[in-house]
Protein backbone atom coordinates (compact mmCIF):
# COMPACT_ATOMS: atom_id res chain seq x y z
CA UNK A 1 0.00 0.00 0.00
CA UNK A 2 1.39 3.43 -0.95
CA UNK A 3 1.44 6.22 1.63
CA UNK A 4 1.23 9.88 0.67
CA UNK A 5 3.98 12.22 1.79
CA UNK A 6 1.54 14.04 4.07
CA UNK A 7 0.45 10.77 5.73
CA UNK A 8 4.06 9.74 6.25
CA UNK A 9 4.97 13.09 7.80
CA UNK A 10 2.00 12.92 10.17
CA UNK A 11 2.97 9.38 11.17
CA UNK A 12 6.57 10.40 11.89
CA UNK A 13 5.48 13.45 13.88
CA UNK A 14 2.99 11.43 15.93
CA UNK A 15 5.60 8.71 16.56
CA UNK A 16 8.13 11.28 17.78
CA UNK A 17 5.47 12.96 19.91
CA UNK A 18 4.64 9.64 21.54
CA UNK A 19 8.37 8.96 22.02
CA UNK A 20 8.67 12.18 24.00
CA UNK A 21 5.68 11.24 26.13
CA UNK A 22 7.11 7.76 26.69
CA UNK A 23 10.38 9.32 27.84
CA UNK A 24 8.47 11.20 30.50
CA UNK A 25 6.57 8.05 31.45
CA UNK A 26 9.86 6.25 32.01
CA UNK A 27 10.45 8.48 35.01
CA UNK A 28 7.52 6.69 36.76
CA UNK A 29 5.52 9.88 37.28
CA UNK A 30 1.85 9.93 38.20
CA UNK A 31 -0.54 10.31 35.27
CA UNK A 32 -3.33 12.80 35.99
CA UNK A 33 -5.43 12.20 32.85
CA UNK A 34 -5.20 11.61 29.10
CA UNK A 35 -5.89 14.18 26.36
CA UNK A 36 -6.22 14.33 22.58
CA UNK A 37 -3.06 15.57 20.79
CA UNK A 38 -5.06 17.94 18.55
CA UNK A 39 -7.58 19.07 21.21
CA UNK A 40 -6.29 19.34 24.83
CA UNK A 41 -9.89 20.05 25.95
CA UNK A 42 -10.80 16.43 25.17
CA UNK A 43 -9.67 14.40 28.20
CA UNK A 44 -10.28 10.98 29.70
CA UNK A 45 -9.22 9.18 32.84
CA UNK A 46 -7.44 6.43 30.89
CA UNK A 47 -5.83 5.77 27.50
CA UNK A 48 -7.94 5.57 24.38
CA UNK A 49 -8.66 7.27 21.08
CA UNK A 50 -9.46 10.91 20.30
CA UNK A 51 -12.46 11.90 18.13
CA UNK A 52 -9.97 12.02 15.23
CA UNK A 53 -8.81 8.45 15.91
CA UNK A 54 -5.42 9.45 17.35
CA UNK A 55 -3.99 7.89 20.51
CA UNK A 56 -4.52 9.96 23.65
CA UNK A 57 -1.39 11.27 25.38
CA UNK A 58 -0.83 11.36 29.16
CA UNK A 59 -0.55 14.47 31.34
CA UNK A 60 1.77 13.95 34.30
CA UNK A 61 1.67 15.47 37.75
CA UNK A 62 4.89 17.44 37.36
CA UNK A 63 3.68 19.09 34.15
CA UNK A 64 1.14 21.18 36.05
CA UNK A 65 3.92 22.60 38.19
CA UNK A 66 6.53 23.22 35.49
CA UNK A 67 7.04 26.11 33.13
CA UNK A 68 4.26 26.00 30.51
CA UNK A 69 6.73 26.43 27.65
CA UNK A 70 9.37 24.02 28.97
CA UNK A 71 9.86 20.29 28.52
CA UNK A 72 12.33 17.79 29.94
CA UNK A 73 13.66 15.05 27.65
CA UNK A 74 15.87 12.10 28.54
CA UNK A 75 19.36 11.90 26.99
CA UNK A 76 18.34 8.80 25.02
CA UNK A 77 15.49 10.64 23.28
CA UNK A 78 17.72 13.67 22.64
CA UNK A 79 20.14 11.37 20.86
CA UNK A 80 17.40 9.58 18.92
CA UNK A 81 15.92 12.87 17.71
CA UNK A 82 19.35 14.08 16.54
CA UNK A 83 19.12 17.26 18.63
CA UNK A 84 21.99 19.66 17.88
CA UNK A 85 22.62 23.02 19.50
CA UNK A 86 24.69 26.14 18.97
CA UNK A 87 25.64 29.23 20.97
CA UNK A 88 23.97 32.59 20.29
CA UNK A 89 26.51 35.17 19.09
CA UNK A 90 26.72 38.95 19.16
CA UNK A 91 28.53 40.02 16.01
CA UNK A 92 28.05 41.89 12.73
CA UNK A 93 25.97 40.83 9.73
CA UNK A 94 26.04 42.22 6.22
CA UNK A 95 22.84 42.28 4.26
CA UNK A 96 23.22 40.08 1.20
CA UNK A 97 20.55 40.56 -1.44
CA UNK A 98 20.32 37.55 -3.73
CA UNK A 99 18.44 37.86 -7.01
CA UNK A 100 18.80 37.18 -10.74
CA UNK A 101 19.86 39.47 -13.52
CA UNK A 102 20.18 39.58 -17.30
CA UNK A 103 23.19 40.78 -19.27
CA UNK A 104 22.56 43.79 -21.51
CA UNK A 105 24.71 46.01 -23.71
CA UNK A 106 26.35 48.95 -21.96
CA UNK A 107 24.31 51.67 -23.61
CA UNK A 108 26.92 54.29 -22.79
CA UNK A 109 29.23 52.42 -25.21
CA UNK A 110 26.82 52.06 -28.10
CA UNK A 111 26.98 54.10 -31.32
CA UNK A 112 23.88 54.61 -33.46
CA UNK A 113 24.61 55.40 -37.12
CA UNK A 114 22.21 57.74 -38.90
CA UNK A 115 22.50 59.90 -42.05
CA UNK A 116 21.82 63.62 -42.33
CA UNK A 117 20.58 63.41 -45.89
CA UNK A 118 18.79 60.97 -48.11
CA UNK A 119 20.30 58.72 -50.71
CA UNK A 120 21.17 55.17 -51.75
CA UNK A 121 23.40 52.75 -49.83
CA UNK A 122 26.32 51.42 -51.87
CA UNK A 123 29.26 49.11 -51.07
CA UNK A 124 27.83 47.97 -47.75
CA UNK A 125 30.56 46.12 -45.82
CA UNK A 126 28.36 45.10 -42.86
CA UNK A 127 26.54 41.98 -43.94
CA UNK A 128 24.96 40.64 -40.75
CA UNK A 129 24.39 41.44 -37.09
CA UNK A 130 27.15 40.23 -34.77
CA UNK A 131 30.01 41.11 -37.12
CA UNK A 132 33.00 42.81 -35.51
CA UNK A 133 34.34 46.14 -36.65
CA UNK A 134 37.29 48.26 -35.61
CA UNK A 135 37.32 52.01 -35.27
CA UNK A 136 37.74 53.77 -38.64
CA UNK A 137 36.83 50.63 -40.62
CA UNK A 138 34.94 51.39 -43.83
CA UNK A 139 31.22 50.62 -43.38
CA UNK A 140 29.41 51.82 -46.54
CA UNK A 141 29.19 54.56 -49.11
CA UNK A 142 26.23 56.77 -49.98
CA UNK A 143 25.11 58.28 -53.26
CA UNK A 144 23.05 61.43 -52.62
CA UNK A 145 21.98 64.11 -55.13
CA UNK A 146 21.84 66.63 -52.28
CA UNK A 147 25.51 65.96 -51.48
CA UNK A 148 26.40 66.37 -55.17
CA UNK A 149 24.74 69.81 -55.20
CA UNK A 150 26.54 70.84 -52.01
CA UNK A 151 29.90 69.82 -53.55
CA UNK A 152 29.15 71.84 -56.70
CA UNK A 153 28.50 74.91 -54.54
CA UNK A 154 31.90 74.52 -52.89
CA UNK A 155 33.68 74.07 -56.22
CA UNK A 156 31.97 77.23 -57.59
CA UNK A 157 33.03 79.21 -54.51
CA UNK A 158 36.60 77.97 -54.91
CA UNK A 159 36.63 79.11 -58.59
CA UNK A 160 35.36 82.56 -57.58
CA UNK A 161 37.78 82.80 -54.69
CA UNK A 162 35.04 84.14 -52.41
CA UNK A 163 36.23 83.22 -48.93
CA UNK A 164 32.87 83.77 -47.20
CA UNK A 165 31.09 81.67 -49.82
CA UNK A 166 33.78 78.97 -49.52
CA UNK A 167 33.29 78.82 -45.77
CA UNK A 168 29.48 78.70 -46.09
CA UNK A 169 29.66 75.87 -48.66
CA UNK A 170 32.13 73.94 -46.55
CA UNK A 171 29.97 74.33 -43.43
CA UNK A 172 26.99 72.99 -45.36
CA UNK A 173 28.90 69.84 -46.31
CA UNK A 174 29.89 69.35 -42.67
CA UNK A 175 26.27 69.81 -41.58
CA UNK A 176 25.20 67.13 -44.07
CA UNK A 177 27.61 64.67 -42.47
CA UNK A 178 30.40 64.63 -45.04
CA UNK A 179 33.64 63.55 -43.32
CA UNK A 180 36.44 66.12 -43.23
CA UNK A 181 38.87 63.95 -45.29
CA UNK A 182 36.36 63.91 -48.16
CA UNK A 183 36.03 67.71 -48.01
CA UNK A 184 39.80 68.15 -48.14
CA UNK A 185 40.01 65.73 -51.07
CA UNK A 186 37.32 67.71 -52.88
CA UNK A 187 39.19 71.01 -52.34
CA UNK A 188 42.45 69.47 -53.51
CA UNK A 189 41.27 67.60 -56.62
CA UNK A 190 38.44 70.00 -57.56
CA UNK A 191 36.46 66.90 -58.71
CA UNK A 192 33.03 65.79 -57.48
CA UNK A 193 32.81 62.71 -55.27
CA UNK A 194 29.98 60.61 -56.58
CA UNK A 195 29.67 58.72 -53.27
CA UNK A 196 30.60 59.63 -49.71
CA UNK A 197 32.28 57.01 -47.51
CA UNK A 198 31.29 56.37 -43.87
CA UNK A 199 33.55 54.77 -41.26
CA UNK A 200 33.12 53.06 -37.87
CA UNK A 201 33.17 55.60 -35.00
CA UNK A 202 34.34 52.94 -32.46
CA UNK A 203 35.27 49.30 -31.91
CA UNK A 204 32.45 46.87 -31.36
CA UNK A 205 29.99 44.43 -32.86
CA UNK A 206 27.06 45.15 -35.12
CA UNK A 207 24.15 44.97 -32.68
CA UNK A 208 21.54 46.06 -35.21
CA UNK A 209 21.71 46.29 -39.00
CA UNK A 210 18.67 47.95 -40.50
CA UNK A 211 19.71 48.36 -44.17
CA UNK A 212 20.89 46.35 -47.14
CA UNK A 213 22.99 47.41 -50.11
CA UNK A 214 21.01 49.42 -52.67
CA UNK A 215 18.35 50.61 -50.21
CA UNK A 216 17.09 54.17 -50.34
CA UNK A 217 17.36 55.76 -46.87
CA UNK A 218 16.32 58.99 -45.21
CA UNK A 219 17.65 60.79 -42.11
CA UNK A 220 14.94 59.21 -39.94
CA UNK A 221 16.11 55.71 -40.88
CA UNK A 222 18.59 54.01 -38.53
CA UNK A 223 21.46 52.43 -40.45
CA UNK A 224 23.12 50.34 -37.75
CA UNK A 225 24.11 50.16 -34.08
CA UNK A 226 27.63 49.32 -32.89
CA UNK A 227 28.09 47.96 -29.35
CA UNK A 228 31.34 47.84 -27.41
CA UNK A 229 31.45 44.68 -25.23
CA UNK A 230 34.46 45.68 -23.11
CA UNK A 231 31.95 46.44 -20.35
CA UNK A 232 28.37 45.29 -19.91
CA UNK A 233 25.31 46.03 -17.80
CA UNK A 234 23.44 43.51 -15.68
CA UNK A 235 19.84 44.48 -14.94
CA UNK A 236 18.71 42.85 -11.69
CA UNK A 237 15.32 42.90 -9.99
CA UNK A 238 15.27 43.56 -6.25
CA UNK A 239 12.12 42.79 -4.27
CA UNK A 240 10.32 45.72 -2.71
CA UNK A 241 11.16 44.58 0.82
CA UNK A 242 14.90 44.81 -0.01
CA UNK A 243 14.77 48.08 -1.94
CA UNK A 244 15.70 50.24 1.06
CA UNK A 245 19.03 48.40 1.37
CA UNK A 246 20.22 49.11 -2.18
CA UNK A 247 22.47 52.10 -2.84
CA UNK A 248 24.67 53.16 -5.73
CA UNK A 249 28.30 52.19 -5.29
CA UNK A 250 27.58 48.94 -3.43
CA UNK A 251 29.71 45.94 -4.36
CA UNK A 252 27.98 43.31 -6.47
CA UNK A 253 28.80 39.87 -7.81
CA UNK A 254 27.34 37.74 -10.58
CA UNK A 255 27.79 34.04 -11.36
CA UNK A 256 26.68 32.08 -14.41
CA UNK A 257 25.85 28.41 -14.68
CA UNK A 258 27.85 27.95 -17.87
CA UNK A 259 30.99 29.33 -16.19
CA UNK A 260 31.47 27.29 -13.01
CA UNK A 261 34.10 28.77 -10.75
CA UNK A 262 33.91 32.23 -12.34
CA UNK A 263 32.64 35.16 -10.29
CA UNK A 264 32.46 38.62 -11.81
CA UNK A 265 32.76 41.62 -9.50
CA UNK A 266 31.14 44.96 -10.20
CA UNK A 267 29.20 47.80 -8.60
CA UNK A 268 25.65 49.14 -8.42
CA UNK A 269 25.76 51.94 -10.98
CA UNK A 270 22.14 53.10 -11.10
CA UNK A 271 18.82 52.46 -9.36
CA UNK A 272 15.74 52.99 -11.52
CA UNK A 273 13.17 55.31 -9.91
CA UNK A 274 10.02 53.17 -10.22
CA UNK A 275 8.87 49.65 -9.34
CA UNK A 276 7.48 47.20 -11.84
CA UNK A 277 3.69 47.31 -11.27
CA UNK A 278 3.34 43.57 -11.91
CA UNK A 279 6.33 42.01 -10.14
CA UNK A 280 6.60 44.75 -7.48
CA UNK A 281 10.37 44.69 -8.02
CA UNK A 282 12.91 47.48 -8.30
CA UNK A 283 15.29 47.34 -11.27
CA UNK A 284 18.95 47.91 -10.41
CA UNK A 285 21.70 48.41 -12.98
CA UNK A 286 25.08 46.84 -12.29
CA UNK A 287 28.22 47.44 -14.33
CA UNK A 288 30.91 44.80 -14.94
CA UNK A 289 34.15 44.78 -16.90
CA UNK A 290 34.09 42.30 -19.77
CA UNK A 291 37.48 42.55 -21.43
CA UNK A 292 37.49 38.82 -22.27
CA UNK A 293 33.92 39.08 -23.59
CA UNK A 294 32.85 36.03 -21.60
CA UNK A 295 29.53 37.69 -20.82
CA UNK A 296 27.05 37.80 -23.67
CA UNK A 297 23.90 39.93 -23.88
CA UNK A 298 20.69 38.21 -22.70
CA UNK A 299 22.50 35.74 -20.42
CA UNK A 300 20.93 35.16 -17.00
CA UNK A 301 23.04 34.98 -13.86
CA UNK A 302 22.82 34.80 -10.08
CA UNK A 303 23.37 38.25 -8.59
CA UNK A 304 24.51 39.10 -5.07
CA UNK A 305 24.48 42.68 -3.80
CA UNK A 306 26.31 43.36 -0.53
CA UNK A 307 24.60 46.07 1.52
CA UNK A 308 26.22 47.79 4.47
CA UNK A 309 26.74 45.60 7.56
CA UNK A 310 24.98 46.01 10.92
CA UNK A 311 27.31 45.57 13.87
CA UNK A 312 26.87 44.46 17.49
CA UNK A 313 23.67 42.48 16.90
CA UNK A 314 22.43 39.07 18.07
CA UNK A 315 22.83 36.44 15.32
CA UNK A 316 21.51 32.86 15.09
CA UNK A 317 21.41 30.33 12.22
CA UNK A 318 18.27 30.68 10.11
CA UNK A 319 17.46 26.99 10.60
CA UNK A 320 17.01 27.56 14.35
CA UNK A 321 14.10 29.99 13.85
CA UNK A 322 10.59 28.51 13.95
CA UNK A 323 8.14 30.61 11.93
CA UNK A 324 4.43 29.98 12.38
CA UNK A 325 3.12 32.79 10.18
CA UNK A 326 1.95 34.84 13.16
CA UNK A 327 4.95 34.67 15.48
CA UNK A 328 8.53 33.46 15.66
CA UNK A 329 10.30 31.44 18.33
CA UNK A 330 13.36 29.36 19.11
CA UNK A 331 14.03 26.41 21.40
CA UNK A 332 16.47 27.35 24.17
CA UNK A 333 18.48 24.55 25.83
CA UNK A 334 18.39 25.10 29.61
CA UNK A 335 20.67 22.18 30.48
CA UNK A 336 19.98 18.80 32.11
CA UNK A 337 17.64 17.86 29.26
CA UNK A 338 15.36 20.89 29.76
CA UNK A 339 14.23 22.91 26.75
CA UNK A 340 12.18 26.12 26.57
CA UNK A 341 10.15 27.42 23.62
CA UNK A 342 10.73 31.18 23.62
CA UNK A 343 9.13 33.87 21.47
CA UNK A 344 11.57 36.16 19.66
CA UNK A 345 11.45 39.06 17.21
CA UNK A 346 13.57 38.48 14.10
CA UNK A 347 15.18 41.17 11.99
CA UNK A 348 17.24 41.09 8.82
CA UNK A 349 18.26 37.76 7.31
CA UNK A 350 21.32 37.12 5.19
CA UNK A 351 23.58 34.24 4.21
CA UNK A 352 21.71 31.65 6.34
CA UNK A 353 21.94 33.91 9.40
CA UNK A 354 19.15 35.91 11.02
CA UNK A 355 19.19 38.86 13.40
CA UNK A 356 17.24 38.56 16.66
CA UNK A 357 16.06 41.94 17.93
CA UNK A 358 14.65 40.68 21.21
CA UNK A 359 14.14 37.44 23.11
CA UNK A 360 17.71 36.10 23.21
CA UNK A 361 21.04 37.08 24.73
CA UNK A 362 24.55 36.29 23.55
CA UNK A 363 25.91 33.09 25.07
CA UNK A 364 22.57 31.26 25.33
CA UNK A 365 22.32 27.80 23.80
CA UNK A 366 19.64 27.13 21.18
CA UNK A 367 18.53 24.07 19.23
CA UNK A 368 19.24 23.97 15.48
CA UNK A 369 18.13 20.38 14.74
CA UNK A 370 15.08 18.58 16.12
CA UNK A 371 13.57 21.83 17.37
CA UNK A 372 10.19 21.30 15.69
CA UNK A 373 9.38 18.15 17.65
CA UNK A 374 10.47 19.78 20.91
CA UNK A 375 8.36 22.84 20.06
CA UNK A 376 5.35 20.57 19.43
CA UNK A 377 5.77 18.97 22.86
CA UNK A 378 6.26 22.36 24.55
CA UNK A 379 3.13 23.75 22.87
CA UNK A 380 1.09 20.76 24.08
CA UNK A 381 2.30 21.22 27.65
CA UNK A 382 1.47 24.92 27.47
CA UNK A 383 -2.07 23.94 26.43
CA UNK A 384 -2.31 21.58 29.41
CA UNK A 385 -1.28 24.41 31.75
CA UNK A 386 -3.82 26.80 30.26
CA UNK A 387 -6.60 24.27 30.86
CA UNK A 388 -5.81 24.17 34.54
CA UNK A 389 -5.91 27.97 34.98
CA UNK A 390 -8.79 30.41 35.05
CA UNK A 391 -9.92 32.43 32.03
CA UNK A 392 -8.77 35.61 33.73
CA UNK A 393 -5.21 34.30 33.81
CA UNK A 394 -5.01 34.19 30.02
CA UNK A 395 -6.72 37.34 28.78
CA UNK A 396 -3.81 38.24 26.51
CA UNK A 397 -2.33 34.86 25.57
CA UNK A 398 -1.93 33.32 22.10
CA UNK A 399 -2.72 29.83 20.87
CA UNK A 400 -1.25 28.88 17.48
CA UNK A 401 -0.48 32.57 17.01
CA UNK A 402 -4.17 33.64 17.07
CA UNK A 403 -5.34 36.36 19.46
CA UNK A 404 -8.12 35.63 21.96
CA UNK A 405 -10.31 38.27 20.35
CA UNK A 406 -9.76 37.01 16.79
CA UNK A 407 -12.81 35.74 14.91
CA UNK A 408 -12.11 32.60 12.89
CA UNK A 409 -14.42 31.69 9.99
CA UNK A 410 -14.96 28.08 8.96
CA UNK A 411 -17.12 26.06 6.55
CA UNK A 412 -18.44 22.56 6.89
CA UNK A 413 -21.33 20.11 7.03
CA UNK A 414 -23.36 19.45 10.19
CA UNK A 415 -23.17 15.76 11.16
CA UNK A 416 -24.88 15.84 14.58
CA UNK A 417 -26.74 18.29 16.85
CA UNK A 418 -27.10 18.19 20.65
CA UNK A 419 -29.49 21.09 21.17
CA UNK A 420 -29.85 20.53 24.93
CA UNK A 421 -26.11 20.81 25.62
CA UNK A 422 -25.42 23.36 22.90
CA UNK A 423 -23.04 21.11 20.90
CA UNK A 424 -22.79 20.78 17.12
CA UNK A 425 -20.61 18.19 15.39
CA UNK A 426 -19.21 19.52 12.11
CA UNK A 427 -17.18 17.91 9.34
CA UNK A 428 -15.27 21.11 8.53
CA UNK A 429 -12.91 22.15 5.77
CA UNK A 430 -9.27 23.15 6.51
CA UNK A 431 -8.94 26.25 8.70
CA UNK A 432 -5.71 27.95 7.68
CA UNK A 433 -5.56 30.43 10.57
CA UNK A 434 -5.34 27.57 13.07
CA UNK A 435 -3.43 25.17 10.81
CA UNK A 436 -6.29 22.66 11.20
CA UNK A 437 -6.74 20.07 8.46
CA UNK A 438 -10.15 18.85 7.38
CA UNK A 439 -11.69 16.86 10.24
CA UNK A 440 -14.94 16.05 12.04
CA UNK A 441 -15.17 17.37 15.57
CA UNK A 442 -17.55 18.70 18.24
CA UNK A 443 -18.02 22.43 18.75
CA UNK A 444 -19.74 24.13 21.70
CA UNK A 445 -22.03 27.09 21.08
CA UNK A 446 -21.42 30.28 23.02
CA UNK A 447 -24.04 31.01 25.67
CA UNK A 448 -25.31 33.91 23.60
CA UNK A 449 -25.79 31.82 20.44
CA UNK A 450 -27.34 28.92 22.37
CA UNK A 451 -30.05 31.26 23.66
CA UNK A 452 -30.76 32.98 20.33
CA UNK A 453 -30.35 30.11 17.83
CA UNK A 454 -33.78 28.78 16.76
CA UNK A 455 -34.06 25.02 17.07
CA UNK A 456 -35.37 24.68 13.51
CA UNK A 457 -32.62 26.84 11.92
CA UNK A 458 -30.00 24.17 11.26
CA UNK A 459 -30.28 20.46 10.56
CA UNK A 460 -27.99 17.51 10.04
CA UNK A 461 -26.32 17.54 6.59
CA UNK A 462 -26.73 21.32 6.22
CA UNK A 463 -23.78 23.18 4.70
CA UNK A 464 -22.94 26.06 7.04
CA UNK A 465 -20.53 28.93 7.57
CA UNK A 466 -19.61 29.49 11.20
CA UNK A 467 -17.63 32.02 13.21
CA UNK A 468 -15.57 30.95 16.21
CA UNK A 469 -14.38 32.91 19.22
CA UNK A 470 -12.09 31.74 21.97
CA UNK A 471 -13.83 31.20 25.30
CA UNK A 472 -11.92 29.74 28.26
CA UNK A 473 -9.03 28.89 25.90
CA UNK A 474 -11.30 26.85 23.61
CA UNK A 475 -12.96 27.83 20.35
CA UNK A 476 -16.76 28.14 20.60
CA UNK A 477 -19.13 28.85 17.74
CA UNK A 478 -20.53 32.37 18.05
CA UNK A 479 -22.42 32.70 14.77
CA UNK A 480 -23.93 30.28 12.22
CA UNK A 481 -25.37 30.88 8.76
CA UNK A 482 -26.78 28.17 6.50
CA UNK A 483 -25.31 28.13 3.00
CA UNK A 484 -27.28 25.16 1.69
CA UNK A 485 -30.00 23.20 3.51
CA UNK A 486 -30.13 19.46 3.00
CA UNK A 487 -33.44 17.98 1.88
CA UNK A 488 -35.12 21.32 1.20
CA UNK A 489 -35.73 22.29 4.84
Image: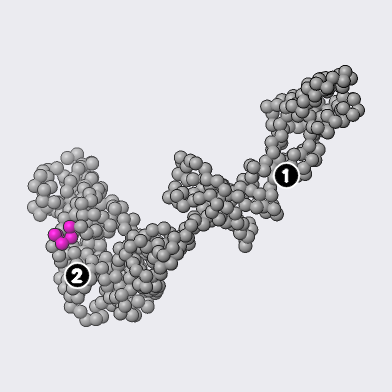
Task: Indicate the position of residue 266 as horizontal and vertical percent values.
Answer: 60, 54
| Pointer 1 or 2: first along the chain | 2
- Callout 2: SS: strand
The number of discs equals 2
Q: Check the image and name the residue furthest to the front.
A: 163
> Image quadrant of residue 156?
top right
Check the image and report above or below for 283 versus 222: below
Mark 1 — residue? 204
Question: Is residue 343 shown left or right of residue 392?
Answer: right
Task: Indicate the position of residue 100 as horizontal and vertical percent values.
Answer: 54, 51
User: Which numbered circle lies on residue 487?
Assistant: none
Check the image and report above or below for 173 versus 424: above
Q: Which residue is drawn at 12% across and 45% down?
A: 453
Q: Is residue 349 or residue 24 the one in the foreground?
A: 349
> Is residue 392 inside the magenta stretch?
yes
Q: Check the image and name the residue furthest to the right.
A: 189
Q: Is residue 53 or residue 228 the one in the foreground?
A: 228
Check the image and report above or below for 359 versus 82: above
Q: Mark 1 packing: few (<14 Cα in 10 Å), some, or many (20+)?
A: many
Q: Provide the residue span drawn in magenta.
A: 391-395
Mark 2 — residue? 34
Nearer mark to the viewer, of 1 and 2: 1
Q: Mark 2 packing: few (<14 Cα in 10 Å), some, or many (20+)?
A: many
Q: Residue at x 60, y 50 (%)?
A: 287
Question: Image quadrant for the N terminus?
Answer: bottom left
Q: Which residue is drawn at 80% across and 40% down?
A: 137
Q: Is residue 86 or residue 39 the one in the foreground?
A: 86
Q: In terms of secondary structure, what is the magenta stretch mainly?
A: helix
> Image quadrant of residue 105?
top right
Amino acid sequence: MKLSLYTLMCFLLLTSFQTLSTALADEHQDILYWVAPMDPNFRKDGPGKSPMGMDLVPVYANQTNSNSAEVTITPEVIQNLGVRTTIVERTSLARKIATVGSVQYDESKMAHIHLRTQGWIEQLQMRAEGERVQKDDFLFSLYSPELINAQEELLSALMLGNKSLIKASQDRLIALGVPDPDIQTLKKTRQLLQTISYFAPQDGVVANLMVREGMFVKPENQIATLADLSSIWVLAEVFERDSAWVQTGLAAEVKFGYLPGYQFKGVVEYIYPDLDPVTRALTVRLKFKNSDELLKPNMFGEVSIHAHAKSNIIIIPSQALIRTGNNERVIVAQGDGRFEARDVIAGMESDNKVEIKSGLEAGEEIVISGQFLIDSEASSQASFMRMSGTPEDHDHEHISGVEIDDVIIGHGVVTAIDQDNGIIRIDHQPIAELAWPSMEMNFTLTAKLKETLPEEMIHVHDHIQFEMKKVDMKYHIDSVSVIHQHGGH
